[in-house]
Image (cartoon, rainbow, N blue to C red):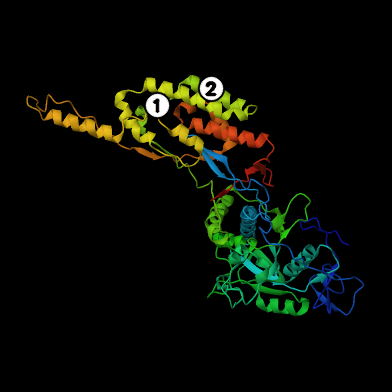
Amino acid sequence: MSVDNFDGDRTADQPSIIYAFDDGDEIRELCRSGHGKPGPSPGDVIERDSTRSNPTERLPELELPGERGLKEDDCGEEIPVFACSQCGKPKYLGRCCGSPTCERDWPAAVKRKSIRLAGKLDSLRRNIYAQYDGKRDVDFQHVVASLPDFQVDSKNSVDRALLVLKTLLEENWQIDGFAAIYHPFRIKKEYRKDQYEHDGKEGEGDMTWSDVLASDDPEEYLKYSPHFHLFFPAVRKSFDYLVAEAVADQSGWVFHRITKEGDSNISVLDLEDLVYQVTYAFSHAGVNEWSADRAELTSRMKGGLHNMSVSDEIKAECTSYFCQAAPKLLGTEFADLNEASCDAEVPSSTDERSTSTKSSEECDEDSSESVSTRHNGDDCHSEQSETDSQQVKNNESETSPEEESSATPESTQTETMSPADSTSNSSPDDGESPSSLSNTTKRTQSNSGTEGDTPNDADPLDPPAVDRRSQCGGELIPIHEAEELLEDREWCVRARHVSGLRTAIKEWHRRKDGEKRLIWRSDGVGGYSPTVVQLH
């Protein structure tokens, strides 16, 4: 075995690969070495009548995403995940395990894979474009490669098949890096809807993959037909179909380039379309458990694609495109923090004088309580009641009668994000009811019309209560970062939802320090990100 180079997947080059198809009747040897030497060159395919190896291992029939029910008992349970950096209002979302086997949370696995893969492909495209000094157009390509009866003498038939594809792409089309997504099944023709949007197969039914995955028995509508979706950047018109036909005749592998209806020159329009197509491909990819600690959607990055880094700007762009595509392709809405902002309604700046503020002592109390919750998370309800009672007393002593009517609209605001917010948004004094206000107005008007009274002598009417609330629009930050805000005395005075944030942080500590699993896990690229991403 030669170890002249590695393609990043810990698999060394082999001099050749033996594989069979058509129930073992056809045997091929694909050469992977021999440059500058007599005899076969890399990429040459040799027909064999027999072989000493035993190519009987087929591509696996892996399960589809979300087939096992809920992975965790608390999947979907609302927990605090983010908070507003300006007003402090916490954001509660459904807990998400992020496993591709979970019937609720498998779209989160698609999100993680799709954004990373699309970002790397874009970086590789830019790199190739720079190699040609901007003189050649470089486009994204989407190609389906299939040899359904592929058999090898290896327990890991998927990796062996990808080595074959890597060699064929390199030697016949000079493709240096690509991504591959493995699909073990196709929809049966009698159930399949025409897939013209991606130049797919004709069908006789009306079902798409979203229909199949949502059905009670997906296997009823599927047939075993393994294939790979390949994505790569290449110089425009470099993927020649005449070459593809010759490769199919020699190797048995069929390469079908996906094109847009009405324009055979376009496979993928742009980065947005790439994210869309990659997301769609991952939605019904096979789920493997080859790693001991996790299940994952089956995909590989080969060649130079491994070495690509993704800028924050491109990652944010891919995330935005994914969040737009997910409701249609995955049936799930995702929160995009790059575009999301706080939707809490707060008094406008002209009404700040009529709203109650906290004293510095109360802010100190908030800060000390937020720290102590790491050890006293079970006492959050009693501590909350005592603090709110003290706040009510302070506000009652500070609010003047004239300010009561202008504070009334604030007291009637109902927050829906969490139970804690309804406490923090309630005004200490509800003021007069609408009926009492109207009666007072009538009495004042009747007194002004009595004999002996003149307009100058009449008591001026109180100005009507005006709702001047506006959307906060503050930046959403992870809940663990929001905890530091409670230590800032000036921020506590300005923020409108300190009480709700304090309760949310206690809940977060209870989750993190208790028996339940951490809601913050490694994102696989050196950082930590929330697994809770789904809205419902």
Apparent side of residue 12 relative to residue 314 in the rendered image (left or right): right
Which residue corresponds to mark 2?
365
Q: What is the crowding at mark 2: few (fewer than 14 residues within 10 Å), some, or many (at least 20)?
A: some
Q: Which mark is residue 69?
A: none
- Split into 4 quadrants, where in the image is the N terminus? bottom right
Which residue corresponds to mark 1?
356
Apparent side of residue 391 relative to residue 101 in the rendered image (left or right): left
Residue lying at the far left in this picture: please name it.
451
Apparent side of residue 63 relative to residue 400 in the rendered image (left or right): right
Q: Nearer the viewer, residue 111 or 137?
A: 111
Residue 72, compared with residue 213, is above or below; it is: above
Residue 332, picture quadrant:
bottom right
Q: Nearer the viewer, residue 48 or 369?
A: 369
User: Residue 370's spot in the image, x, y percent?
Assistant: 58, 27
Examine the rendering and report whether any part of residue 490 can be seen. no
User: Residue 247's spot in the image, x, y percent?
Assistant: 74, 76
Cα separation, mark 2 vs mark 1, equals 17 Å
